[in-house]
Image: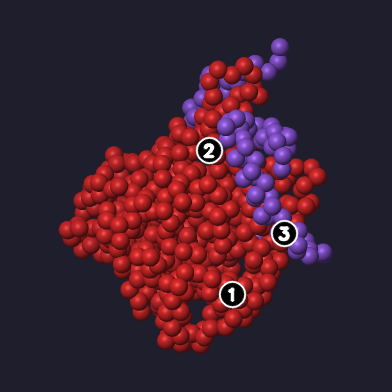
Chain colours: A red, B purple
Amino acid sequence: MSIRFKTLSELKKLLEKKEISSFELVSETFRNISSSKTNSFITLDEEAALSKAKDFDQGKVNGDLAGIPIAQKDLFCTKNLRTTCGSKILENFIPPYDATVVKNLSNAGSICVGKTNMDEFAMGSSNETSFYGTVRNPWSLDRVPGGSSGGSAAAVSEGLVCAATGTDTGGSIRQPAALCGITGIKPTYGRASRWGMIAFASSLDQAGTFARNAEDCALLLNHICSHDTKDTTSISDMQENYLVNLNNDLNGKTIGIIKEFDISSLNKEVQDSFEQSKKIFENLGANFVEISMPNIKLSVPTYYVVAPAECSSNLSRFDGVKYGYRAKNVENLEELYIKSRSEGFGDEVKRRILIGTYVLSAGFYDAYYKKAQQSRRMIKNDFVDAFSEVDIIMSPSSPSSAFKIGSKTEDPIEMYLEDLFTISSNLAGVPAMSIPHGFAKGLPIGLQLIGNYLEESKILNFAHQYQKNSDWHLKTPNLGESP
Amino acid sequence: MDNKTVETISYLARLQLDKDKKEKITKDLENIINFVDELQSLDTKDVAPLSNPLEKVASKREDSITSKSRKEAFLSNSPESDQDYFIVPKVVE
């Protein structure tokens, strides 16, 4: 029996009916990974995974996700399993503890098969900044999978695993989900614990997940999200069961379209898909209204002050002393810091540390950092105002489908604009997801659904109803061949 | 963004740029700063800065020991250590 492209819920049923064993499931997963051409994984954990599968088959493991193989983005610390964050500087780092998200998923019985490739320290939108090589898009191997969670997105898209974790600081779940033709969700800031996530920009970072559909994402979020006293920004509100509201009626619900996102400037196929998706929701009884979010056009510049500032501070911990790469042949402590960091970090990470250092330095702090924090509040207020009128907001997830590897690496700003539609949700901290909704130039594109604070279940409800009335999420890549 | 500024911030960040990449990175930084300069057009009078989307106050807990000493586990990740210490080049004469 081929397990490729099966959903999490389908695999759960097969295990329950004992039509397949977890051992077979995990073995087949490793066979598929070994013949994959996408470079989705940095580190595999075959021995431990097979042993856990045996435990499940012997009835020793229970839980909602018991016996199901999944992948973890290599940004989550995994106890005794190498965690690189896509960087040379952490090439030999073996965490002594599990991230809360990893622990939660493990407690639910899932089996981690390995750590997925990613842009170095999650800084990138194409997975090309990884020290461990570019990930290739399963739909066309000469294209990028998006980033930064490119390995997780490609692994799910290619059917290597039915689910994988991701993190989203400016679009790092939604944009690769869109470019790989799968479903991905970033919950409200603070809904999932950041404990054990290697920090990039702490006020923006949020864990989430990729799967083949919204229903599976809901099931995964039930376990990924939790209140955690080890994360001071963790939300203590009651935990929801995200499966409960999936089938709510959309009749009379209101969807906002942001006037300032100029969709008419995008590729015709992207525009047409957007119109067709509107029709699907209209047929389900939803209404559309145009909303104005006047400050949203400043999201990308705001982000490229706030995120590098936090990154420059967070990444100062990498100094070659307590863990990570240490340069050889140094004469004093300062040289140890400088050489270890200069040899350990890649170019994009250095660029962002330098920008962050600049905007935080004396004389520039008010003009850049404080200004961006003020702009951030104005963007957040735009969302608060919008959600007083609408249930959810809808936009494309990214400006276009997957681009060719190497085509945007020379100009950082062109790359930064990939996240034009996703960045504002991180600045405001609201939940957002991407679902497949068509093709442009033969490659998948995504539809972004943004919800109000803590209304993950509402966007999941819209996404699930959309997927019950369309088949874009059922399309799979013709592996190894360009479209 | 000139060479001197790039040198200053590189030193503050404890980074050394490869000679052959310096020119490109200076130009990139200049472009990025020009790009974010768009923020200067925004009227932010009386707008309080927002540093965290939830504006939560960090919760406090009792100052008590919550986990066992895992000295060995942490030292084992160090590039160089002995039984009790991280080892670095000599800092005092």
Tag 1, which chain?
Answer: A
> Residue shown at 42%/75% (left/top)?
A273
Q: Mark 1: give few (<14), some (14-19) or many (20+) Cα within 10 Å.
A: some
Mark 1 or mark 2, which has the lower sequence index? 1
Residue A328 position within the rendered picture, expressed as x and y whole percent measured from the top left: 53, 20
**Structural distance between the alpha carbons of marks 1 and 3:** 20 Å
Task: Count how many numbered circles sit on residues in the image.
Answer: 3
Assign a secondary structure to mark 2: loop
Assign a secondary structure to mark 3: helix
According to the picture, the residue beneath numbered tag 2 turns out to be A346
Quadrant in which the N terminus of chain B appears: top right
- For residue A42, the mark is none
According to the picture, the residue beneath numbered tag 3 turns out to be B39
In this view, A187 is above or below B4: below
The amino acid sitting under disc 3 is Leu
Quadrant in which the C terminus of chain B appears: top right
Q: Mark 3: give few (<14), some (14-19) or many (20+) Cα within 10 Å.
A: many
Let me know if marks 2 and 3 both belong to one chain. no
According to the picture, the residue beneath numbered tag 1 turns out to be A258
Residue A76 position within the rendered picture, expressed as x and y whole percent measured from the top left: 47, 46
The amino acid sitting under disc 2 is Gly
